[in-house]
Image (spheres, rainbow, N blue to C red):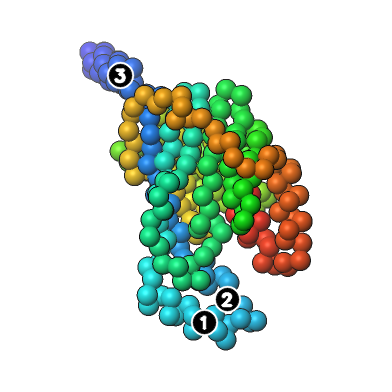
Amino acid sequence: MKTTLKYIILFAVIFISKSLSAQNIHFVKNGVIEFEKRSNMYALIKKRIDKDNETYMKEAFEQYKKNNPQFKVAKSTLSFNSDKSLYKWPTIEETVNNNWLSTDVLADLKNTIATNFDSQTSTTQKSVYEDTYLVKDSVRKINWKITDETREIAGYECRRANAIIMDSVYVVAYYSNQIAVSGGPESFTGLPGMILGLALPHENVTWFATKVTEVAVPEKDLAPPTKGKPTDNKGLKAILLGAMKNWGEYAHPIYKAFSL
């Protein structure tokens, strides 16, 4: 009986200790997250090689690998508070190799996205070749499947979630509920915490946070973009499909990239 009572007291102490620890967890609601986007150019270029172009593309690809790194790297930031976020790219671009093979729509994608979590709406400034569009619509609805897998990103413990968007794009996300905002890079939201890691495995691209700074963000730093031809997601889809109607199989990956 004494042994049983001893174990009951021990379990009670452990439970209370865990409860007190949970109460002391600090939840971040304002700040700036620095992201690093990595695009596997070797994999992306290899996908472009087919029987119609292999005579010159294979040689060009081998030359590219001798003179260029495997990954194209780009930096972006996500500023946020509990109500809004703004995802953007630096005004000054990093110096990159202008080899024609290194040009890729998804790797070079530079959307600016303002998200309003209260109204569940977003404003996206999207460059499509020579044109710039201002896409205003509701946020993307994603049917996330949360798993038990975890990993640490930028000092935060994150849990993995998987999803399929646009019928065929497989998405892996890692979110932290210590950052109590349902946001993330690009147009990815909808998890019970901030997305700090994002991968599109079949598209060979990832976004991972490298630094999280908890700081009060002025409202002006969360203002949505204003320049561009106004449209919504349905309108942009019609524009893209119309422009690429004669592009054949080359249109599909480009359409997916511009639709992210």
Viewer-nearest of discs 3 and 1:
1
**The label number, if any, that marks residue 58 in the structure image:** 1
- In the rendered image, residue 82, in percent from the top left (x then y), is placed at 47, 23
Gap in Å between the C-alphas at discs 2 and 1?
A: 7 Å
User: Residue 49's mark?
Assistant: 2
Q: Residue furthest bottom?
A: 55
Q: Amino acid at mark 3?
A: Asn
Disc 2 marks a residue whose amino acid type is Ile
Tags 3 and 1 touching, CB below 8 Å: no
Quarter assignment of residue 257: bottom right
Foreground pick, 150 / 5: 150
Q: Circle 3: is it few (<14), some (14-19), or many (20+) Cα within 10 Å?
A: few
Give the residue drawn at x 37%, y 42%: 34
Quadrant location, the N terminus: top left
Which label belongs to residue 24?
A: 3
Residue 162 against residue 106 in the figure, above or below: above
Contact between labelled residues 1 and 2, with CB atoms less than 8 Å apart: yes
First-in-chain label (2 vs 1) = 2
> Along the polypeptide, which appears first: circle 3 or circle 1?
3
Please name whichever residue, 255 or 23, is drawn nearer the observer in this view of the structure: 255
The number of numbered discs placed on residues in the rendered structure image is 3
Instruction: From the top left corner, tell me how far across and down residue 134 is, in percent.
Output: 63, 40
Q: Position of residue 221 (x, y in %)?
A: 44, 30
Where is residue 197 drawn, in percent x and y? 43, 44
Helix, strand or loop under label 1 = helix
Please, is residue 180 above or below residue 114 in the view? above
> In 3D space, how far apart are the residues under numbered discs 3 and 1 (Cα atoms)?
58 Å
